[in-house]
Image (tube, grey):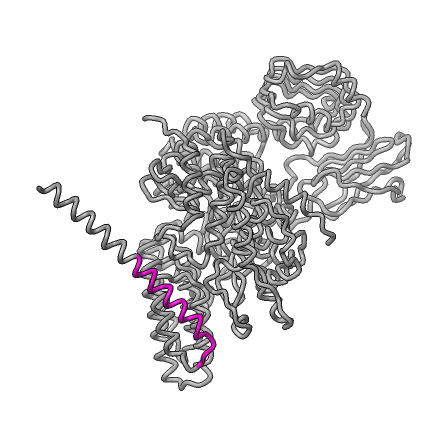
C-alpha cells in the first residue's frame, strides 16, 4: 500500500512538473514574442519593463533584455526628475539583487548593476561595499564580486591606500589568506612603490611582506598561496633585474665566426670591434639568447685588441687555445648583494621550517628554487636530494620534478664548462637522469666546438630540443627511452645538422630496431 | 575499486538527442543555442560519430547556422553589428527593428567552427562584415565585449576574437598590441592569467589567453621564466582531475582548459594520466550519457564536450586528436587550412 501510494505520487509529481515546465515555456515564448513586437515603441516602455523583468528573473543571462532596459533607462535619464530617477534606479538595483540571489555568478546581473547605479542622482557606492562583503562571506572566491568591489571602491573615491587598508581589514575579518595575498599584490605597487623606481615595491614594505609570508608559512605551510606570493616577491617582476638590459655572458671570436650569448632574451645585436675597427657583417639571432656573426677576418692570432659591446655591457676578449674568448663569472651575474642576502635569508627560513614540518612539499620546492638562484654549484647535491624527496611527497607531479632535475643538472654542467675550454670538444652528460635537453641552445660555444657528445644512460624520450651540432663526430645515445614513434627520432637527428657525424649509437632504446644507422649516417652527411 | 568503462556510443547518442531537441534545463541558454550546438557538433566529430549523422541533417544544421548570420545594409553603421546570433529568438523581419539585431562574439566563433566541422567551405560567410563586427567590439583596454549593445568584457572574448580572425585569415579584426597589453596586465602574482587585470588567476582564462597568443603567433611576449612559472602553476592544478584555481575542487572541464594549455606549452607529458582519466570517468553518466562537472551530478553539454576533449588529450582510443589552440579536431583544422585559399 505504502509502496503503491509512493509510486502514484511520483507519477503525479512528474506530471505536475511536466505541466509546470510546459507552462513556463509557453509563458516565456509569449513574453519574448510580445517583447520583440513592441520593441522601439516608446509609449509601451512601462509594459516592456514589466515583461523583461518577468523573463529576467528566471533567465538573468539574456543580454538583449538587459540592453532593452538600458535603452529605456537612458531615455528616462533625459525626461525624469532626479527624485523619480532615484526611485527607478533603486528598483533596478533591487532587480539585479534578486537575480544575483538566484545566481551569484551572473555576468549580466553584476554588469547591469554597476551600469545603472551610475544613473542615480546620489549613488551610494559605499553601501555596495557592504553588499560585496556579504557576498564574499558566502563565497570568497567569487571573482565577479571582487571585480565589482574594485569598481565600488574606485567610485567611492577610495585611494589605493584606502583600498589597501580595506583589504587589511578583510584579512582580520577572517578571509583566508588566499584573497588577501592577491589583493595585496595588486595594491602594494600603487600604495608603496619604490621611490627610486628600481623595484615594484619599496624595500621596507618588501621586507615586511616577506615577514608576513614567513608567519603564514609557519601557521599553515600547506597554504600554497603564501608560497606563490613569496616567489612573486623574490622574482623578476618585483626586482631590479627585470629592468636591466640583457648581459653578455660569453663571447667567442674564431676565424670565420663570432658568437655572443646573453643572460636573457636579447633583441639588439651586439657590436664587435677588432683593433679599433667595427667588424663588418650581419649579426643573426640564432636563438633567443645567442647572436652569431659570420665575418671574413681569417687569422685571429694577430689581433691585439678585441671587444664586444652590447647595451648590457662590454667584454674584452682574451686569446685562448680555441680563439679569442671572454666569459663572465657566475657570481657577478644578475643578483646584487642585497638581493643575495634576502635569498639566503629565505633559504635559511625554509630549512628551519623543514625541521618543524618535514613533509611539506612547498617548502622543499621553494628551497630548490632558492638554491638554484643563489649558487648552482654549491647546492647541486642538495637540490638533487630535495627533488628526490619531492617525488616521494608529491608523486602526482613526479614527471615535473624529473624535468626540473634535467634542467638543474644542465645548469650545473653549464657552470662547470665555462671555466675550462678543453672540455668543450668532448662533452659528457652520461648518467645524469636527463629527461630533456635544457639550455643546449645556450651552449653556443660548446655546440660550435663539440666533437664528442655522450648522452648515454639517461631518460631521453625525444631529442626535440637537440640544436645544431655541426662539428659533432661522435654521438652516444645508448640506454635512453628514445621513442618508437615512427620517424620522430629520425627527424630530430636530421634537424640537428649533424653533417660531420661519423659514429652513432642508439642501442638499448625502444627505437633501436627502427633506425638504420648506416643509412642515417650517409644521408646526414649529404645535408 | 571497479574500473569505469568509457562508453563513447552512449555519449554519441546523448549529443544526437541534444541536436534534435534541447532539454528543459537548458532553457536559460535559449539565446545561446548555437554555442550548445557547437558542443554537440564538435563533440560528435571527436567521437568519430559525425559521419554517421544523416547527410541531410548535417546540411540542415549548416542552413540553420547561416540563417543566424547578420548581414550589413546600406547604413555604414550596420557593419558593426555583423557576425552571427545565438538563435532566432531575436531574429526580426522588419527593417526598422533590424538595428536591434546584434551579433554575439561567442556565437560568431562557434558558428564558424561548427560550419567547418560540418564540412562547409565558409563561402557564404560575409568575411569583411564579420571582421568589422568583431573589431567594433574591442574596448580601449584591448579586451572584447560580446555584444554591441553592451556586456562585460574579458579574456573569453579575446579568445573568440582570435579564433575568428585566424579562421577568416584577417587580423584587422583586432588591434593586436592592445590585446597583448591586456593579457600581460592580467598576469597575477601566481604567474598565471586572470579574466582581467586585478583578478585572480584562473584555468579557463589562462587557456583563453595562451590559445589566443598561439593563434596570433605572439607567445613570445612572455619570457622563458614567465612561461616556466606558468607551467609550474598549471601542473600544480592537478589534484586527481584538475581544478581551475587553488583550493577549489576538481572539475571535468579543467582537464581540457588546463590540459590543453599544458599541451600548447609543451608540458602535458608531466601530468599523471591515470588519475586524470579516473577522475574524468568518475563524472561519466552511464544512463543518460554525457559528463558532469563533478561525480553524481547531472551531465550537461559543456562538461560532456570538455570531458571528451580531456580524454582525447590522453589519446583515448576511439577519439580524434584535437587542435588545442583552435578547439576542434585536427581533421577539421586541416580542412580549414585547405579552404583558406582567399587572398587577404
Is residue B280 or residue B51 the one in the foreground?
A: B51
Residue A441 in the image, given as x and y percentages of width and height: 69, 33
Residue found at x 66% / y 24%: A487
Q: Is residue A260 left or right of residue A115?
A: right
Q: Residue furthest front?
A: B56
User: Residue B281, position in %: x, y?
Assistant: 39, 34
Give A227 or A282, whichever is nearer the viewer: A282
Q: In which quarter of the view is residue A255 placed? A: top right
Pick the front one: A62 or A386 = A62
Relative to residue A150, is residue A220 drawn left or right? left
- Residue B71: image x %, image y %? 60, 64
- The correct choice, above or below, for A400 with respect to A477 in the image is below
Look at 53% across and 25% down and name the residue there: A381
The reply to whether residue A278 is visible in this rendering is yes
- Asked if residue A501 is positioned above or below residue B122 in the image, the reply reads above
Q: Position of residue B291 (x, y in %)?
A: 39, 40
Q: Magenta region, mostly helix, strand or loop? A: helix
Q: Quadrant of residue B171?
A: bottom right
* Residue B232 seen in this snapshot: no
Residue lying at the far left in this picture: please name it. Answer: A1
Is residue B45 found inside the magenta-colored segment of the image?
A: no
Query: Which range of residues does the magenta coloring cover?
Result: A22-42
- Which of the image's four quarters has the C terminus of chain A? top right
Looking at the image, residue A385 sits to the left or right of residue A244; the answer is left
Query: At 62% across and 47% down in the image, what residue appears?
Result: B215
Amino acid at each position: 500500500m505504502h509502496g503503491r501510494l509512493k509510486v502514484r505520487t511520483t507519477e503525479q509529481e512528474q506530471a505536475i512538473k511536466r505541466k509546470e515546465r510546459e507552462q513556463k515555456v509557453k509563458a516565456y515564448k509569449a513574453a519574448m514574442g510580445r517583447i520583440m513586437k513592441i520593441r522601439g515603441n516608446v509609449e509601451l516602455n512601462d509594459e516592456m519593463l514589466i515583461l523583461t523583468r518577468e523573463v529576467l528573473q528566471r533567465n538573468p543571462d539574456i543580454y538583449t533584455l538587459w540592453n532593452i532596459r538600458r535603452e529605456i533607462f537612458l531615455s528616462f535619464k533625459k525626461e525624469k526628475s532626479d527624485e523619480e530617477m532615484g526611485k527607478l534606479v533603486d528598483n533596478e538595483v533591487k532587480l539585479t539583487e534578486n537575480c544575483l540571489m538566484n545566481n551569484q555568478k551572473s555576468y549580466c546581473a553584476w554588469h547591469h548593476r554597476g551600469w545603472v547605479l551610475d544613473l542615480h542622482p546620489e549613488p551610494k557606492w559605499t553601501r555596495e561595499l557592504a553588499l560585496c562583503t556579504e557576498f564574499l562571506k558566502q563565497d570568497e572566491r567569487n571573482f565577479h564580486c571582487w571585480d565589482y568591489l574594485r569598481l565600488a571602491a574606485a567610485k567611492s573615491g577610495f585611494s589605493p591606500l584606502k583600498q589597501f587598508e580595506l583589504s587589511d581589514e578583510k584579512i582580520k575579518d577572517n578571509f583566508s589568506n588566499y584573497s588577501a595575498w592577491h589583493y595585496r599584490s595588486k595594491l602594494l605597487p600603487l600604495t608603496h612603490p619604490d621611490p627610486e623606481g628600481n623595484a615594484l615595491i619599496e624595500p621596507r614594505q618588501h621586507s615586511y611582506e616577506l615577514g608576513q609570508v614567513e608567519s603564514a608559512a609557519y601557521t599553515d605551510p600547506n597554504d600554497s598561496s603564501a608560497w606563490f606570493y613569496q616567489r612573486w616577491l623574490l622574482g623578476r617582476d618585483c626586482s631590479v633585474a627585470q629592468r636591466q638590459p640583457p648581459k653578455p655572458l660569453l663571447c667567442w671570436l674564431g676565424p670565420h665566426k663570432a658568437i655572443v650569448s646573453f643572460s636573457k632574451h636579447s633583441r639588439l645585436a651586439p657590436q664587435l670591434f677588432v683593433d679599433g675597427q667595427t667588424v663588418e657583417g650581419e649579426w643573426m639571432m640564432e636563438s633567443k639568447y645567442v647572436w652569431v656573426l659570420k665575418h671574413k677576418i681569417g687569422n685571429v692570432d694577430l689581433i691585439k685588441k678585441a671587444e664586444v659591446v652590447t647595451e648590457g655591457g662590454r667584454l674584452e676578449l682574451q686569446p685562448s687555445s680555441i680563439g679569442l674568448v671572454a666569459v663572465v663569472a657566475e657570481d657577478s651575474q644578475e643578483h646584487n648583494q642585497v638581493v643575495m642576502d634576502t635569498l639566503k635569508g629565505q633559504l635559511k627560513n625554509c630549512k628551519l621550517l623543514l625541521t618543524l614540518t618535514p613533509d611539506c612539499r612547498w617548502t622543499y620546492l621553494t628551497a630548490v628554487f632558492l638554491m638554484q638562484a643563489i649558487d648552482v654549484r654549491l647546492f647541486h647535491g642538495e637540490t638533487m636530494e630535495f627533488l628526490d624527496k619531492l617525488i616521494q611527497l608529491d608523486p602526482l607531479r613526479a614527471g615535473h620534478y624529473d624535468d626540473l632535475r634535467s634542467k638543474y643538472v644542465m645548469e650545473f654542467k653549464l657552470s662547470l664548462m665555462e671555466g675550462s675550454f678543453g672540455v668543450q670538444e668532448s662533452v659528457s652528460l652520461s648518467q645524469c637522469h636527463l629527461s630533456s635537453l635544457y639550455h643546449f641552445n645556450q651552449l653556443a660555444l660548446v655546440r660550435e666546438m663539440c666533437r664528442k657528445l655522450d648522452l648515454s644512460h639517461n631518460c631521453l624520450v625525444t631529442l626535440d630540443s637537440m640544436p645544431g651540432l655541426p662539428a659533432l663526430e661522435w654521438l652516444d645515445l645508448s640506454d635512453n627511452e628514445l621513442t618508437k614513434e615512427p620517424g620522430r627520432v629520425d627527424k630530430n637527428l636530421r634537424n640537428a645538422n649533424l653533417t660531420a657525424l661519423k659514429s652513432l649509437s642508439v642501442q638499448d632504446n625502444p627505437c633501436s630496431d627502427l633506425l638504420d644507422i648506416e643509412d642515417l649516417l650517409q644521408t646526414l652527411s649529404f645535408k | 575499486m571497479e574500473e569505469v568503462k568509457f562508453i563513447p556510443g552512449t555519449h554519441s547518442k546523448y549529443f544526437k538527442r541534444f541536436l534534435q531537441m534541447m532539454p528543459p534545463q537548458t532553457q536559460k541558454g535559449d539565446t545561446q543555442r548555437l554555442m550548445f550546438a557547437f558542443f554537440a557538433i564538435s563533440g560528435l566529430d571527436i567521437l568519430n560519430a559525425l559521419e554517421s549523422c544523416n547527410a541531410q541533417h548535417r546540411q540542415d544544421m549548416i542552413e540553420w547556422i547561416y540563417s543566424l548570420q547578420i548581414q550589413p545594409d546600406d547604413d555604414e553603421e550596420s557593419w558593426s553589428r555583423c557576425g552571427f546570433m545565438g538563435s532566432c529568438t531575436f531574429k526580426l523581419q522588419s527593417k526598422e527593428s533590424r538595428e536591434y539585431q546584434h551579433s554575439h562574439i561567442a556565437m560568431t566563433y562557434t558558428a564558424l567552427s561548427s560550419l567547418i566541422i560540418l564540412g562547409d567551405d565558409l563561402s557564404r560567410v560575409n568575411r569583411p562584415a564579420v571582421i568589422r563586427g568583431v573589431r567594433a567590439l574591442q574596448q580601449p583596454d584591448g579586451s572584447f565585449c560580446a555584444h554591441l549593445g553592451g556586456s562585460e568584457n574579458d579574456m573569453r572574448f579575446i579568445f573568440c576574437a582570435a579564433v575568428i580572425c585566424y579562421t577568416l585569415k584577417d587580423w584587422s579584426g583586432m588591434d593586436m598590441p592592445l590585446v597583448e597589453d591586456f593579457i600581460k596586465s592580467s598576469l597575477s602574482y601566481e604567474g598565471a592569467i586572470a579574466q582581467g587585470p586585478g583578478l585572480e588567476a584562473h584555468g579557463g582564462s589562462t587557456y583563453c589567453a595562451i590559445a589566443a597568443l598561439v593563434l596570433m603567433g605572439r607567445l613570445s611576449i612572455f619570457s622563458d621564466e614567465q612561461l616556466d612559472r606558468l607551467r609550474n602553476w598549471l601542473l600544480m592544478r592537478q589534484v586527481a582531475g584538475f581544478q581551475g584555481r587553488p583550493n577549489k575542487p576538481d572539475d571535468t572541464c579543467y582537464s581540457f582548459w588546463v590540459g590543453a594549455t599544458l599541451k600548447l606549452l609543451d608540458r602535458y607529458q608531466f601530468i599523471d594520466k591515470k588519475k586524470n582519466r579516473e577522475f574524468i570517468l568518475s563524472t561519466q553518466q552511464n544512463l543518460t550519457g554525457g559528463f558532469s562537472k563533478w561525480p553524481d551530478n547531472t551531465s550537461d553539454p559543456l562538461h560532456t564536450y570538455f570531458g571528451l576533449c580531456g580524454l582525447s588529450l590522453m589519446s583515448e582510443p576511439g577519439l580524434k586528436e584535437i587542435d588545442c589552440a583552435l578547439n576542434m579536431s585536427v581533421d577539421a583544422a586541416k580542412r580549414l587550412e585547405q579552404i583558406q585559399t582567399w587572398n587577404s
